[in-house]
Amino acid sequence: MNEQLTTIKNYLEQKMPFKPEVGIILGTGLNDLVDFITEPTIIPYREIPGFMQTTAPSHAGNLVFGKLGNAKVAVMQGRFHFYEGHPMSKVILTVRTFQILGIETLIVTNAAGSLNEDFKPGSLVLLEDHINFMGTNPLIGANDPELGERFPSMNEPYDHELRRKAFEIAERLGFKLHSGVYMAVSGPSMETRAECKAFAMLGADLVGMSTVPEVITARQAGMRVLAISVATNMSNIFHSEAHSQEEINQNAGKAKQNLQGLIMQILQEI
């Protein structure tokens, strides 16, 4: 394990109230899940050695330890993006931190543009697969065998059992949970109409600027992964209007209740 991760581990072990069981990364407009955490220990990113302050809109930039129901969780309230100018080693620092704390299950959320006319703004989509179109990979460079193997398999990046459980829960809670493929791009510019049409032809249902580097890293670490996208806007395949952060945050808010209910119930049953 490299010196930076050792420093982070030593620092957090002095701060966290218990060993967390599940790690959660909250995406754009989805910070409110932490309001349900009991006995929270809040650590701003700026206080964690090696962490940066996220500059993405609506990302609070805190690591929160606490309990969601009976589950002991560590929640990243915001993430680091490639488009912020960080190297991939920094983009995936959230997941590496979960790994060195012994977390074996990761729940990732994000806001994404819809390439599928059935995924309307406010829809929840469980990722079944992804396409890495970011032009790089978080595992490029020297490999540390302590962190995982050199060539991790991506045959099933999203855990089958966790997905099955999520669909069961959504049905009980009475809302439609979709399933789709996520295309990861670097950003920060939004995608053109031609790009969106090309991505859809390649098999993508959603497009966004995060998640995939985290999932690749988590799978190398041997974590079980569940990823949930909130469709926050219809892509320009379907219209010619400009997108805005206000629109994205507003539509993320539409899914908040269902997303929170889904995650809370998953934590009770895994």
Image (cartoon, helix red, strand yellow):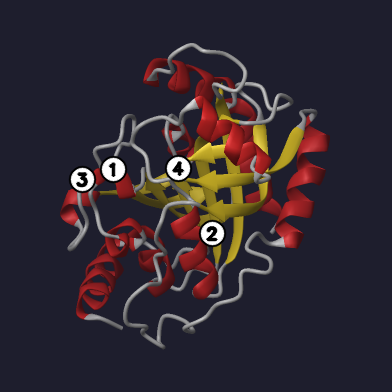
Dot placed on the residue nearer the N-terminal end, 3 or 1: 3
Q: Which residue is mark 1?
A: 61
* Position of 262 relative to 132 (above/below): above
Dot placed on the residue nearer the N-terminal end, 2 or 4: 4
Disc sitting over residue 53 in the figure: 3
Report the residue at 26% width, 59% height from top: 87
Q: CA distance from mark 2 to mark 4?
A: 11 Å
* Position of 45 relative to 58 (above/below): below
Dot 4 amino acid type = Leu
Disc sitting over residue 267 in the figure: none
- Mark 2 and 4 residues: CB-CB less than 8 Å, in contact? no
Report the residue at 76% width, 28% height from top: 175
Q: Which residue is mark 4?
A: 26
Front residue of 107/16: it is 107
Dot 1 amino acid type = Gly
Seen as rendered, the residue at the extreme bottom is: 145
Position of the N terminus, as image quadrant, is bottom left
- The residue carrying pointer 4 sits among few (fewer than 14), some (14 to 19) or many (20 or more) residues within 10 Å by Cα, namely many
Disc sitting over residue 106 in the figure: 2
Dot placed on the residue nearer the N-terminal end, 4 or 1: 4
The picture places residue 214, in percent across and down from the top left corner, at 45, 58
The picture places residue 58, in percent across and down from the top left corner, at 34, 30
Dot placed on the residue nearer the N-terminal end, 3 or 4: 4
Q: CA distance from mark 3 to mark 4?
A: 15 Å
- The residue carrying pointer 3 sits among few (fewer than 14), some (14 to 19) or many (20 or more) residues within 10 Å by Cα, namely some
Secondary structure category for the residue under label 4: strand
Dot placed on the residue nearer the N-terminal end, 1 or 2: 1
Residue 85 visible? The answer is yes
Q: CA distance from mark 3 to mark 2?
A: 22 Å
- Mark 3 and 4 residues: CB-CB less than 8 Å, in contact? no
